Image (tube, rainbow, N blue to C red):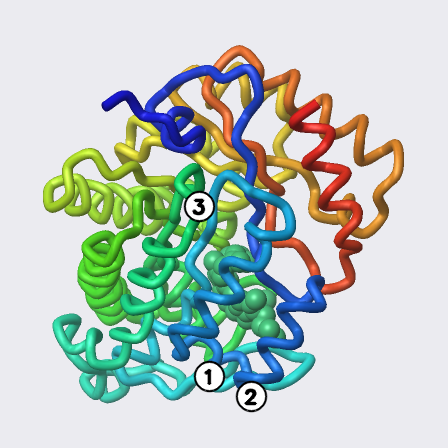
Amino acid sequence: MAETKKLLRALAGETLDTPPIWMMRQAGRYLPEYRATRAQAGDFLSLCYNPELAAEVTLQPIRRYGFDAAILFADILLVPQALGADLWFVTGEGPRLSTITDQAGFDALKPASAIHDTLSPVYETVRILSRELPAETTLIGFAGAPWTVATYMIAGRGTPDQGPAHALREGNTALFEALLERITEATIDYLSMQIEAGAEVVKIFDSWAGSLKGDDFAKYAVEPCRRITAAIKDRHPGIPVIGFPREAGEGYVGFHAATGVDCVALDNSVDPEWAAKNVQVSGCVQGNLASSHMVTGGQALVDETRRIVKAFSGGPHIFNLGHGITPDADPENVQLMIDTVRG
Ligand code: 1CP
């Protein structure tokens, strides 16, 4: 049967008249219905591990806006938790984890094969979603890339420059690489289980790839993404993979070929016309409207949305923001972006 879902058509390399659209963090605090369900769940992690409510918040932006894709509601930090790290969220600040800074900390982690005990509710969320989503909506599963996940496991929190992770990389390269290896194995199994439960596409979020330079970018951003993509394609032929090496800059060039991903997601620091010439020539791209437009709206939102659609109109493109939508965004600006894209 010929593929009819727009997102899958773009991922297969088709140039569409109107790009499919979805939005990073589309289920999130900018929506009143999300805040209500999160309050019902009690807290963020309880929401992630409650399949009915996690499916409900995943569906909310689909009902409200009719996006072409739904992304599983979960978090990249569930994998460290499943490997044995302590994880909690401090209201108004963000995630906190127990830290891994030495061999003893690493030795206390569970093997990759043990993650499913913790993560099985996530697979149940995927199963509910694959039953309940509209026929035209694609279901995206995801995980964090090993480097990005490691930055949180080493520092115990989000960091502006990933300093603690770089320090371990330099000071104890063997331990750092063993940690990346453990996360890579866990990520392959985790994504594989999401696909078995019904995810049709998977996305690998390397939010902190931009702080890896030169050979380190090749070793710790490109290579793990290549390994995960190869393993997914080996186990699940035909499942498309989206890679997001955020703030990679020149590192976006050649990323399709170096990793085997079907689509490269772009942050908004790269110019769409440059990216069309240098990245989209190699395959589908996703992006890349600055999420600040969801706060400010108006003619600037319309103009910038049109500029991005036009720049990428000569090849396969999935419209998205350059990073997640923020809690202070106005839901009406999201509608304005969608109306502008769909013309
Ligand atoms: O208070 C709340 O309700 C929590 C806010 C929130 C949400 C809605 C967090 C905490 N995570 C999520 C969901 C989430 N996270 C999704 C679900 C699907 C969707 O997009 O709608 C996804 C894909 C993520 C991925 C994620 N989590 C990333 C990668 C993408 C990115 O934004 O760069 C990262 C780095 C995280 C860690 C994390 N989780 C939450 C926060 C606030 C953070 C960032 C911490 C930091 O700034 O370092």
Q: Residue furthest top?
A: 314
Secondary structure under tag 1 reads helix
- Is 166 on the left or on the right of 241, as rendered? right
Q: CA distance from mark 2 to mark 1?
A: 6 Å
* Residue kind at label 2, given as amino acid type: Gly
Residue for point 47% across, 43% down? 69
Ligand 1 contact, mark 1 (Cβ < 8 Å): no
- Is 227 on the left or on the right of 330, as rendered? left
Q: Looking at the rendered structure, which numbered label has been put on residue 46?
A: 1
User: Do we see residue 178 in this rendering?
Assistant: yes
Q: Is residue 215 above or below residue 11?
A: below
Residue for point 22% across, 82% down? 109
The image quadrant that residue 60 belongs to is bottom right
Residue for point 11% across, 41% down? 234
Secondary structure under tag 2 reads loop
Q: Is residue 244 above or below residue 300?
A: below
Mark positioned earlier in the residue sequence (1 or 3): 1
Q: Nearer the viewer, residue 110 or 299?
A: 299
Q: Are dots 2 and 1 in contact, CB under 8 Å?
A: yes
* Residue kind at label 1, given as amino acid type: Ser
User: Do we see residue 159 in this rendering?
Assistant: no
Instruction: Give the percent coordinates (x, y) of residue 325.
Output: 66, 54
Q: Looking at the rendered structure, which numbered label has been put on residue 42?
A: 2
Identify the image quadrant of the C terminus.
top right
Label 1 or label 3, whichever lies nearer to me, is 3
Q: Are dots 1 and 3 in contact, CB under 8 Å?
A: no
- Is 53 on the left or on the right of 118, as rendered? right
- List the residue tagged with mark 3: 134
